[in-house]
Image: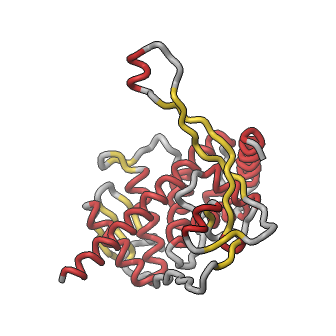
Amino acid sequence: MNKEELLKSTTEAIEQLAKSLETGSILLFKEFLDCLSRFPQYSYRNVLLIQRQFPEATEVKGFSAWLKEGRSVSKGQKGIAIVAPTPFRTTTENEEELATNPEVFSFRAVYVFDISQTQLIDESDVQPGVPEAFDACLAMERVYADLGIYIESAELPNRVLGSSFGGKVIINQHQTFRSRLQTLAHELAHELLHQKHGKLDTSIKRSIRELEAESISYVVCRHLGVDCLLDSVRYIASYKKGPDELRQSLVRIQQTALEIIRKLEESATATQDTACVA
């Protein structure tokens, strides 16, 4: 695939996603979120490309990157085409413009391979452990503390699981650890994405805010290895936006999910360092 074919493929995928949401179907969007949970570091466009070409992929790297990991790509395997930015110098006589924008990014097609397409060069292959919901809850609560967001557990009416108030989140105290984790991730998404200086950003429609927060929560929990439900059918049923609006939501979902995942990793590293010193 060349660059133009890849961009065309992502456009078609977004249009297909938008059409499925407009009809109230959750399946295609859920499949996208499942893929995003495995590759939160990639742009939504590249996630769509991976999903289209190799939907069962769990871990992808380039040919050389796999060699550094002690694995080689198996003979006859076909690469997964994604896009990668390529910086180049601008050609201009305007010194001020060159100083403020010395590089412009173009895009090119590159190929990655799933781990299932590789084989071990040696026998050592250590797989990371999967955290339990209880440990994941503790990690999420540490992220809240790091961000200065207060968590209050309380009785909430009408089966409400949680609410975000800009710097404070109230969580229903009657939840399993798995449900609590998903609620904490959902409300943190609201705090990071939809609360502006303690006030709710009403420029985004409520159904879109909830769809984004629930999608982010789902991606984060799945990335942590915790099975959860995508509880957003009622929001998807009311989704009537087109491809352009969907692109904006996909960007927000991917970026905020990655932000939360990185904060969880940073918190875990800090905790390990403290334990080593103690």
How far across and down, in percent of the image, does residue 72 sit? 66, 71
- Pick out the residue farthest to the front: 122
In the foreground, 241 or 12:
12
In the foreground, 98 or 122:
122
- Compared across the picture, whether 139 is left or right of 250 comes to left
- Pick out the residue farthest to the top: 93
Q: What colour scheme governs how the chains and residues are painted in the rendered image of this protein?
A: secondary structure
How far across and down, in percent of the image, does residue 15 sit? 74, 45
Q: Quadrant of residue 96?
A: top left
Q: Residue at coordinates 42% horizontally, 72% vertically from top-left? A: 157
Q: Residue at coordinates 76% horizontally, 46% vertically from top-left? A: 9
Q: Is residue 90 visible?
A: yes
How far across and down, in percent of the image, does residue 92 sit? 50, 16
How far across and down, in percent of the image, does residue 85 sit? 58, 42
Q: Is residue 198 above or below residue 231?
A: above
- Compared across the picture, whether 79 is left or right of 190 comes to right
Q: Is residue 7 above or below residue 158?
A: above
In the foreground, 231 or 129:
129
The C terminus is located in which quarter?
Answer: bottom left
Q: Residue at coordinates 48% horizontally, 31% vertically from top-left? A: 103
Q: Is residue 237 visible?
A: no
In the foreground, 151 or 63:
63
